[in-house]
Amino acid sequence: MDHRPLGRTGVSVSPLCLGAMMFGAFGNADHDDAIKIVHRALDAGINFIDTADVYSGGESEEIVGKALAGGRREDVVLATKVGLPLGDDPNRGGTSRRWINEAVEGSLRRLGTDRIDLYQVHRLDASVDVDETLGVLSDLVRAGKIRMFGASSVPASQIAEAHWTAERRGRERFRTEQPPYSLLVRDAEYDVLPTCRRHGMGVLTHSPLAGGWLTGRYRKGREIAGPGSAARLRRFPAAYDATAPANAAKLDAADALGALADEAGMTLVQMAIAFVIRHPAVTSAIVGPRTMEHLESYLAADGVELPGDVLDRIDEIVPPGHTINVADNMWHTATSALEATSRRR
């Protein structure tokens, strides 16, 4: 597997990043099986792993730590995230100096390491001055606890503001961004991806299979209500209700994309992942297997090229910069300014 520069950090990573969200109670609760999946990914050439403190309440980080014990830690660019709430205590979440200083120690302990290669803000906290967040993250870099930091699902305007603040206040800056990006969720092409490229940021996109809609299993006329594991269906029932108008439109598009993949002689999974990682601003696509079978299907996308006529057909089904269901952009969780009620006088 070839490697690519992670922005201008001097670090090189694989075009596929192993996402660990499905390890633990939320997905695969069998630690031994999850560890085998991690080892298979490393053996296949993946050297980039992404997790978060909030995934299965820290269990995901523990599994990743176990998998990297015994000498495999040095082979990996290890990324985790902070910011989403851990429990009901309002101070156990967000991007304040108080919480980040506490949260990083928990992540280091669960991961079984003395440093995190890429520490990402899961969402920017509107109640915290971005300078405070950049300040504590800069201090962690200087202390050697993290090597660099990035952001996740941050709008382009806030990326630019954070860079301006870092320059004016003498802070370290966001080196990466992690937006949602897939054949069905293309809003990032409009502003976020060009902004990241302009600032020399690495981009590790998440949800290349659109949360399961692009696995190829969900086609019109089949006796399946909608995608998602049992855990996903319990936690996000609205996102997987195929009868909802926005999701019905996603099913229509996924069906057309599946037919196109069949014509092109590849699986929809291969086409979906190849599409994401061919964008010039994208460094790596995060793939989050729950089973070994899932991982093998993702690995099969490595090296797949999409000819121009296939890309043109994709653009006819989902135009560039367009997202079928705007809720999938996730910007609404990052800033209330994009909500309709906030735009009123």
Image: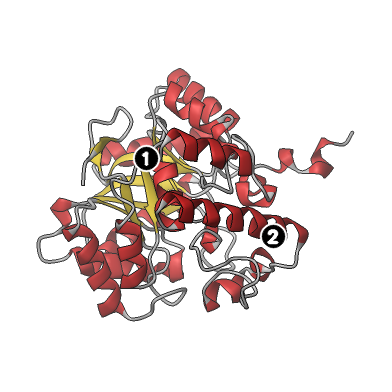
Q: Name the residue: 67% across, 46% down.
A: 332
- Along the line of sight, the residue nearer the viewer: 328 or 298: 298
**Residues packed near mark 1 inside 10 Å, few (<14), some (14 to 19) or many (20 plus):** many
Percent across and percent down for residue 70 are 10, 66
Q: Residue placed farthest to the front in the image?
A: 263
Residue 50 lies in what quarter of the image?
A: bottom left
- Give left or right: position of 139 versus 207: left
- Along the line of sight, the residue nearer the viewer: 297 or 203: 297
Which of the labelled discs sits on residue 149, or is there none?
A: 1
Q: Earlier in the sequence, mark 2 or mark 1?
A: 1
The residue type indicated by label 2 comes to Asn
- Give left or right: position of 99 versus 303: right
Q: CA distance from mark 2 to mark 1?
A: 34 Å
Quarter of the figure with the C terminus:
top right
Placement of 318 over or under 85, stated as above or below: above
Residue 174 lies in what quarter of the image?
A: top left
Percent across and percent down for residue 13 are 25, 42
Placement of 158 over or under 60, stated as above or below: above
Placement of 172 over or under 98, stated as above or below: above
Which of the labelled discs sits on residue 247, or is there none?
A: 2
The residue type indicated by label 1 comes to Phe
